[in-house]
Every structure is written in C-alpha cells, then in structure tokens.
Image (spheres, rainbow, N blue to C red):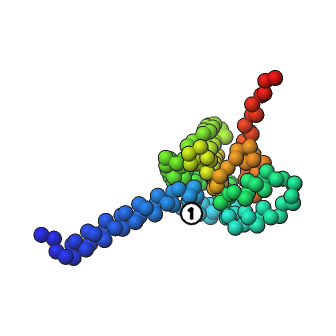
Amino acid sequence: MKTLFQKLITTFSISVVFAACAALTVYAQDGRVQVAQLEYLSSKASTTIDVTIDEKLLQLTAKLFKKGEDDDVKELINGLKGIYVKSFEFDKEGQYGDADVESIRTQLRSPTWNRIIGINSRKDGKVDVYLMTNGSQISGLAVLATEPKELTIVNIIGPIDLEKLSKLEGQFGVPELGIEPPAKPKVKN
C-alpha cells in the first residue's frame, strides 16, 4: 500500500507532466521558433544579426506609414504578431553543426507547420520554407537557410497574405525570400 507521501509525490508528478504538456501546446501554437539555444554561436560568428520586432513595435511602425503610401505593407504589419530574424555568418566552415539545425527543424515538424519549399544545393546549402496554418488561414512563416558559412532563421508570426508578404522582403530585417505573389486568374471574355 502506498504511503500518503508516495501518493502526494505521484499526484504532484502527474500534475507537473500535464502542466508541462499544456504549456508546450500553447507555446508551440503561437508560431514562435525558439532560437535561444543557438546563442553560443555568436562567439564563433564574424557577424550576428538579431532582429526582434514584437507586436507593439509593429503597431508603432504601421503608424509611421502615411495613408495611401504602402497600404498593403501597413495592412500586413497591422495583423502581424512578430518578425524575428537570427543570422550567423562565419569566417570558416564547420562553425555550427547538424544538432544546431536539428533543434530548429524539430520545432518545425509539429503538425501545425508544413514545409512548402525545400531547396538543397551541395555547393550553396539548403533553404526550407514552412507555413503554419490554422484551417485555411496562414498564421506563420519560418525560413531556415543553411550554408557552409551561414545559418539564418526567419520567423514571421500572425496572419499572412503571401502577396503582401512579398512586399516586406528587404525591409524590417526580412531577407529577399523570392516569394512570388500568386498569379491572378485570367478572366475569359
């Protein structure tokens, strides 16, 4: 027969496991890709880029656009929850490992993320683009680019219109992603 102390420990352990699972579920659903585990690479990198634009800063930025000026960009920014970019450039190859990349890919293997683009070049590296969907709505985008001397993670959180997103390339730390706006259907006369 279990002692009262053993029952208490068992109940506490089960509660902790359920709380942790609930926290991880909520954490994973917000779309934020965690990159803190890569921070040690900053000491090895010749250049580190760290862009953190949260929802409050995005709202403030949207107010800076004048009416009629880049309305699509302003509308896109108003709906976003965050733009996060982490990039490391190294002087020589081999400064980051497969485990570093796998720590990001593991997060992007959840059922809410779908890989939509995968480009692999022995010479130039690999680029994977993931979309987080909620029903038919895109609620996040993640780009993982690995090159022999560079590692970059781009994470955009919030409802995303791909046509408008292409206008963010080159702004707010978002690199040129090569996003082509969807083709408009031709109307037959």
Can residue 176 be seen? Answer: no
Q: Secondary structure at mark 1?
A: helix
Name the residue at the left extreme: 1
Q: Quadrant of the N terminus?
A: bottom left
Can residue 110 be seen? Answer: yes
Question: Of 172 and 139, which appears nearest the observer?
Answer: 139
Quarter assignment of residue 155 = bottom right
Quarter assignment of residue 51 = bottom right
Would residue 11 appear left or right of 18 to someone viewing this image? Answer: left
Check the image and report above or below for 49 versus 177: below
Name the residue at the bottom extreme: 5
Find residue 100 and report its horizontal and vertical position in percent.
Answer: 54, 54
Q: Quadrant of the C terminus?
A: top right
Find residue 56 and report its horizontal and vertical position in percent.
Answer: 70, 67
Would residue 59 appear left or right of 122 to someone viewing this image? Answer: right
Q: Residue tagged by mark 1?
A: 36
Count all numbered tags in the image, as a single digit.
1
Question: Of 40 and 15, which appears nearest the observer?
Answer: 15
The structure residue drawn at horizontal position 21% and vertical position 76%, both measured from the top left corner, is 5
Question: Of 185 and 173, which appears nearest the observer?
Answer: 185
Rate crowding at label 1 as few (under 14), some (14 to 19) or many (20 or more) other CA atoms within 10 Å.
Answer: few
The structure residue drawn at horizontal position 19% and vertical position 76%, both measured from the top left corner, is 4
Would residue 58 appear left or right of 140 to someone viewing this image? Answer: right
The structure residue drawn at horizontal position 47% and vertical position 58%, both measured from the top left corner, is 25
Find residue 72 and report its horizontal and vertical position in percent.
Answer: 79, 51
Name the residue at the front extreme: 189
Q: Amino acid at mark 1?
A: Ala
